[in-house]
Image (cartoon, rainbow, N blue to C red):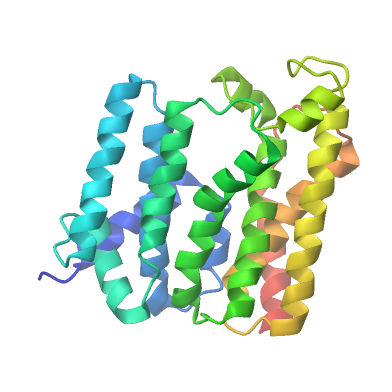
């Protein structure tokens, strides 16, 4: 079996850099010799996400996701077939990544393609977030150096918090492609049928309450288990929590412009984090 080459590692790093995602912030807190494996996890997620979000026919999207499902099976069987899976195969052998989570991510993206997801129940929404967000955390933990149950519980709470933050932030963008991740229970309770409704802020407030609870649960767990070998996840939490708080301060009656962090805010966040955790 061919080991991943330097070109393979450059390939996945370029995917992360070109995406300009807040996910890249967490990399700065990870030792360099482990960073490439995390880049590969992100690149894998990016590939699946791009398939789900592209403008191709549903059948073509499902075909491409199924091709990735086959690649994952080949990867697990010890026959990786591309740069991403070559790196992930080595990561599995070095860090014992939970292999089923690779399939969970594909299942989540298939839900987006088969949908589109529109006003799911809270139960369906949590199941979706478990597949597309928590899976990433559980795959990343062994690379960070933590596999204990407390760290897994932390990844669960943080995954929900981060994905709910994304849902609150991307309401307009999701609506433009026919998706609505807001729970039907809240939509019905507040008599909201579309995002132009004057009561949308009440629905967003309901989701924000859950989001804040998951951030608090993650913080409580972090105090119990300690942040050793969890620095990338902690930095991610701080970045997304900052976005969430900016939206809170703006008020849920405003959904534009899309909230994010400026380059300056990201730089100060990283510097302050490194100063405290040096």
Quadrant of image for the C terminus:
bottom right
Q: Which of 181 and 46 lies nearest the eye of the viewer?
A: 181
Q: Position of residue 257 (x, y in %)?
A: 73, 28
Asked if residue 77 is positioned above or below residue 22 in the image, the reply reads below
Res 264 visible:
yes
Asked if residue 201 is positioned above or below residue 136 in the image, the reply reads above
Q: Position of residue 17 (x, y in %)?
A: 44, 52
Q: Which of 264 and 185 lies nearest the eye of the viewer?
A: 185
Quadrant in the rendering for residue 2: bottom left
Q: Position of residue 6 (x, y in %)?
A: 22, 67
Quadrant of image for the N terminus:
bottom left
Q: Which of 187 and 34 lies nearest the eye of the viewer?
A: 187
Residue shown at 78% from the left, 41% from the top: 207
Q: Is residue 180 left or right of residue 74?
A: right
Res 230 visible:
no
Quadrant in the rendering for residue 47: top left
Residue shown at 36% from the left, 34% from the top: 51
- List the single residue furthest toward the left: 1
Q: Position of residue 86 (x, y in %)?
A: 22, 63
Q: Is residue 32 left or right of residue 123?
A: left
Residue shown at 64% from the left, 32% from the top: 120
How many labels, in total? 0
Asked if residue 64 is positioned above or below residue 144 in the image, the reply reads above
């Amino acid at each position: 079996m061919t080991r991943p080459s330097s070109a393979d590692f450059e390939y996945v790093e370029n995917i992360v850099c070109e995406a300009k995602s807040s996910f890249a912030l967490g990399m700065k807190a990870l030792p360099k010799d482990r960073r490439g494996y995390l880049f590969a996890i992100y690149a894998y997620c990016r590939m699946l996400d791009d398939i789900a979000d592209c403008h191709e026919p549903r059948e073509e999207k499902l075909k491409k996701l199924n091709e990735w499902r086959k690649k994952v099976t080949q990867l697990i069987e010890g026959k990786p077939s591309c740069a991403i899976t070559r790196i992930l195969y080595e990561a599995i052998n070095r860090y014992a990544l939970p292999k089923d989570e690779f399939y969970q991510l594909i299942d989540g993206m298939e839900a987006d393609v088969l949908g589109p997801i529109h006003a799911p129940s809270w139960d369906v929404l949590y199941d979706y977030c478990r597949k597309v967000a928590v899976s990433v955390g559980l795959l990343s933990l062994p690379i960070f150096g933590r596999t204990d149950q407390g760290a897994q519980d932390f990844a669960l709470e943080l995954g929900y918090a981060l994905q709910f933050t994304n849902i609150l932030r991307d309401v307009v963008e999701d609506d433009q492609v026919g998706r609505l991740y807001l729970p039907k229970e809240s939509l019905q309770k507040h008599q909201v049928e579309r995002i132009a409704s004057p009561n949308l802020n009440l629905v967003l407030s309901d989701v924000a309450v859950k989001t804040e609870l998951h951030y608090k649960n993650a913080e409580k767990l972090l105090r119990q288990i300690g942040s050793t070998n969890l620095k990338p996840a902690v930095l991610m939490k701080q970045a997304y929590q900052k976005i969430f708080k900016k939206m809170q301060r703006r008020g849920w009656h405003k959904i534009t412009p899309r909230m994010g962090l400026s380059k300056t805010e990201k730089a100060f966040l990283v510097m302050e984090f490194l100063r405290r955790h040096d």
